[in-house]
Amino acid sequence: MNTRLYLIPIIAAWLLFAACCAASGSLAQDTENCEMTAWFGQEEPYLLRDARTGRVTGPDAELMREMLAAIGCRLVFLELPWKRAIALVRAGDLDMVPFASYTVEREEFGHYSVPYRTTYHRFISTPENGLSDHSLPDFLARGGRIATMLGYSYPLGISTTLSHPAYENQIIILTSYDQQVQMLRTGRVDGIIASDTTLQHRVIKAGDVDFEIKVIDVYPANLHFLFSRKSVSGQTVERINQFLETRPSPGN
């Protein structure tokens, strides 16, 4: 009997067993040490920092914690400007951002989750400027000035109009929502495009009783979590999507 031939199946089985054990141990270790970084910015009521404890709270914060806990990961928030956060996701230095609307450009460097919430952008003006009865294209065609946010991706119905070369000098790009509201209040712009969050937590809280606004148009948009392709695998995003698809639907 050839002893070498007899030993081959035994050695193969032993190697397979050892490989499976190693993989199992590695997976457990990865899960134990799994940590994901996510963008944080003050976006009431969905993301905000508790002034007393310093903890990031809000429904989106808790959802992110729950979905990462479901796959054995811990969440770490990093407070960053939005545009820089997107650049870090592209580079693989930040794992994820919430509030991401879909664009072809972002899909080149990021995995999109399934939609987790629908938001509504509202084109807002003031009756005093005489332009508040016109749609967005007519508003701009009549010389209206609009404040938008730097690095923000607007729904197609908005972005197509704003990108028209004829209106380039009428689009004022700002870095904060509070700047948008202040410029509208003081008449330095004639309109802003704001989400429900901005409308409810910045415009209404402005505290100026003479500050009358009018919502002209409403544009719905799905929001996703955007994960860096360089730091988060497609399999991980699939597991997160499974969690999101089976959870109860939240209110908008």
Image: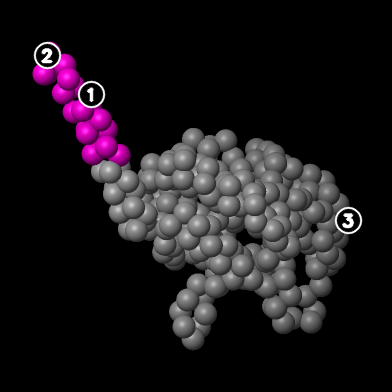
Q: Is residue 85 visible?
A: no
Q: Is residue 62 visible?
A: yes
Tag 3's secondary structure? loop
Q: Is residue 173 magenta?
A: no
| Three-letter amino acid code of the residue under disc 3 | Asp
How far apart are the alpha carbons under marks 3 and 1? 81 Å
| Crowd around label 2: few <14 · some 14–19 · many ≥20 (10 Å) | few
- Residue 205's image quarter? bottom right
Q: Position of residue 44 (x, y in %)?
A: 62, 71
The residue that mark 3 highlights is 133
The residue that mark 1 highlights is 9
Of the residues under marks 3 and 1, which one precedes in the sequence?
1
**Which color mode does the image show?**
one colour
The residue that mark 2 highlights is 2
| Three-letter amino acid code of the residue under disc 2 | Asn
Of the residues under marks 2 and 1, which one precedes in the sequence?
2
Residue depicted at x 64% and y 64%:
180
Tag 1's secondary structure? helix
Task: Assign the N terminus to one quadrant of the image.
Answer: top left
Secondary structure mostly seen in magenta is helix
| Three-letter amino acid code of the residue under disc 1 | Pro
* Residues rendered magenta in the picture: 1-20
How far apart are the alpha carbons under marks 2 and 1? 13 Å
Residue depicted at x 59% and y 55%:
99
Q: Is residue 7 magenta?
A: yes
Instruction: Return the mark for residue 235.
Output: none
Residue depicted at x 28% and y 43%:
21
- Say above or below: 169 vs 10: below
